[in-house]
């Protein structure tokens, strides 16, 4: 079951002490488990508002309530508070929540889509962008369509060749190239003009 480091427990207890709600617990739930979009949702949970099916893990000062449908996805998860001179950062590591990459026997388009969603799009999201697989040609060229901040961006060629193509061909040597099918002239809010 999910582990919470001592520093994270201290952090949670300090936050709980600042609230005027009596005893508070924490509740964690995985949204979109088993997909590249999976994420953890951690919230305060006032006593009495837990779900009957929640799994309870007791800690000093609070209980962690794990949503029943999230238990298996969080089996190897841990929560830590990484202390720094300027404060710190809460970190949830949940390696199982996104599932795993489709096997070598899966269709190439399914495997490419997985890499786009788990490796490429999180990086593009920092600039408000995204990319999606449009198709893979018979000659094994990957055709992509950009959106968001990448649609019309002046750096998209660099992103395509130096980032996306290198990543995809690193995973899938059978890919012969990566092409952009986006009409960048219609981009409404590009990251770089």
Image (cartoon, rainbow, N blue to C red):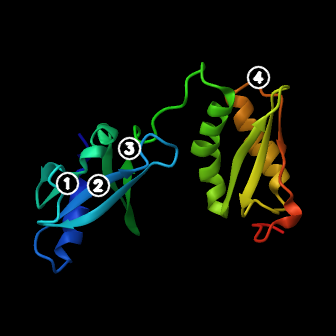
Image quadrant where residue 103 sits: top right
Q: Residue furthest bottom?
A: 20
Label 2's element? strand
Q: In percent of the image, x 55 and y 28: which residue is there? A: 102
Label 1's element? strand
Viewed as shown, does residue 37 lie left or right of 192?
left
Viewed as shown, does residue 76 lie left or right of 6?
right
For the residue pair 176 and 19, the one nearer the viewer reads as 176
Task: Report x, y in % for residue 50.
Answer: 17, 60
Label 4's element? loop
91 shown above or below 186 = above
For the residue pair 184 and 125, the one nearer the viewer reads as 184
Sequence-first disc among 1 and 3: 1
Label 3's element? loop
Q: Disc number at residue 64? A: 1
Q: Disc 1 vs disc 2: Cβ atoms closer than 8 Å?
A: yes
- Which residue is tagged 2? 28
Mark pair 3, 4: CA separation = 31 Å
Q: In percent of the image, x 71 and y 35: which residue is there? A: 168
Image quadrant where residue 60 sits: bottom left
């Amino acid at each position: 079951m999910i582990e919470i480091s001592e520093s994270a427990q201290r952090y949670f207890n300090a936050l709980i002490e600042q609230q005027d709600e009596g005893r508070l617990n924490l509740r964690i739930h995985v949204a979109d488990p088993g997909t590249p979009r999976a994420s953890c949702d951690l919230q305060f949970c006032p006593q009495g508002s837990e779900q009957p099916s929640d799994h309870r893990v007791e800690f000093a000062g609070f209980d962690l309530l794990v949503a029943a449908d999230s238990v298996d996805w969080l089996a190897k998860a841990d929560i830590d508070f990484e202390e720094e001179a300027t404060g710190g950062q809460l970190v949830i590591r949940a390696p199982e929540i996104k599932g795993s990459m489709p096997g070598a026997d899966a269709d190439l388009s399914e495997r490419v889509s997985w890499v786009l969603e788990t490796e490429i799009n999180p990086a593009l999201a920092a600039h408000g962008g995204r990319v999606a697989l449009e198709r893979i040609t018979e000659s094994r060229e990957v055709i992509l369509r950009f959106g968001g901040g990448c649609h019309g961006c002046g750096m998209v060629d660099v992103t395509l060749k130096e980032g996306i193509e290198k990543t995809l061909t690193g995973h899938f040597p059978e890919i012969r190239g990566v092409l952009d099918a986006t009409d960048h002239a219609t981009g409404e809010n590009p990251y770089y003009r």
